[in-house]
Amino acid sequence: MLINHAAQIRALSPSELEEFVDDWLAQRYKDYHDHELWRGTGDMGRDVTGYVTDRRMEGPWDNFQCKQLKSNLSEASAFIELGKIFKHSADGAFSLPRAYIYVAPLGVVRNVRHFVAHPEQFRQAFLDWWDTDIAGALVENQIVKLTSKIEAKIRAFDFTKVSWLDANRLVNDPACKPALVKWFGADPGPGPRGVVPDEIQASESAYIGQLLRIYEEKGQGSYADAAAALACTKFGPHLRAQRTRFFDSVAFDRFYRDSTPGEYLQNFKDEVFHGVFDVHCAAHEGLYARLTKVMQQAAVLQPSGVLGKHASPQVKQGTCHQFANVGLMPWDC
């Protein structure tokens, strides 16, 4: 059954919408160094802020103004909310944001869409309407006249950086997927298979080196490198299978790191580790026998949650090679 996540976002409370947007920004690590959720009175027109650098609000920052309403965001509300930014920036509370985004799950009225689409008209409307339509709505029981400082802020602001998001636009942002998983149990879907490069990569050298020593113990003679083992009729197919498992697990990690909250992947790895740990520690008739038993156990594990649902046997087996790679569960000791 197809789940309407946009409808679920529209059903959130105002405070929940702010938290949802904060979770969304947590995944936009390519865009932001950090982010912050502002709560309660005194937010000065900021709901959720995304910081481009470690200078936070002393550097470039974006403001996400969340408006969970019973109807589309009105023209008056759009002017008042952005007007708060100009007022408090003129007072010295913070610099102007790099971008300003209205997050209105039900969307915005036609006039707001018009102004967003015509940045210079938007700027001029602020200058023309401030004293008549905006000044009395910014601070309770106070009239905030258009001072020269406020006017300077309006003229300095880049109105091309004003935009809006409704629930559908938010859902369609790829970075929103982890928040949908966390809040609504969305299924990120199956991850892609891995691609095994012809050449041995530095990222796999540790566990492969361990396998070469296991092959030496199991067979006769030594293997100078992976190429020698791959050329061996006895161990070549085995090593190719292990590389397939490793790169399937790497592709799995990459996909779900971007499509689920960070703790999901860590929980999956913890369950695989504890699911095979006792087998790894048990007594075996040689290192190759231990490796085989661990691989057999990993294949039949049933980790919990959505990642367990999509983890193939080779992903769970490849995850064990990742443990060996970092020395957490080495194969040759």
Image (spheres, grey):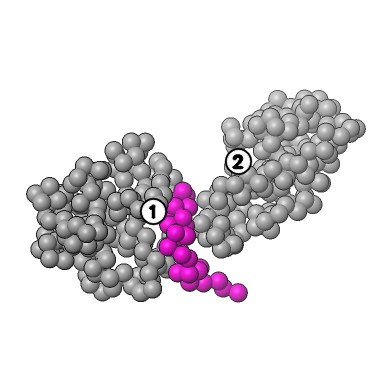
Disc number lying in front (2 or 1): 1
Q: Quadrant of residue 106?
A: bottom left
Considering the image in quadrants, where does the C terminus appear? top right
Left or right of 113? Residue 127 is: left
Q: CA distance from mark 2 to mark 1?
A: 57 Å
Against 111, residue 97 (above or below) is above
In this view, the residue farthest toward the front is 141
Considering only order in the chain, which callout, 1 or 2, is on the residue closer to the N terminus? 1
Q: How many marks?
A: 2
Q: Quadrant of residue 91?
A: top left
Against 4, residue 327 (above or below) is above
Q: Residue at x 18, y 62 (%)?
A: 136
- At label 1, the amino acid type is Gly
Q: Are marks 2 and 1 in contact (CB under 8 Å)?
A: no
Left or right of 215? Residue 249 is: left
Q: Is residue 169 magenta?
A: no
Residue 15 percent coordinates (x, y)? 44, 59
Q: Residue at x 46, y 65 (%)?
A: 13
In magenta, the rendered stretch is: 1-27
* SS state under label 1: loop
Q: Which mark is residue 40?
A: 1
Residue 120 appears anywhere in the view: no
State the residue position of label 2.
198
- At label 2, the amino acid type is Asp
Main secondary structure found in the magenta portion: helix
Residue 92 percent coordinates (x, y)? 21, 42
Query: Toward the viewer: 291 or 236?
Result: 291
Q: Residue at x 37, y 60 (%)?
A: 66
Query: Toward the viewer: 37 or 194?
Result: 37
Q: Which mark is residue 152?
A: none
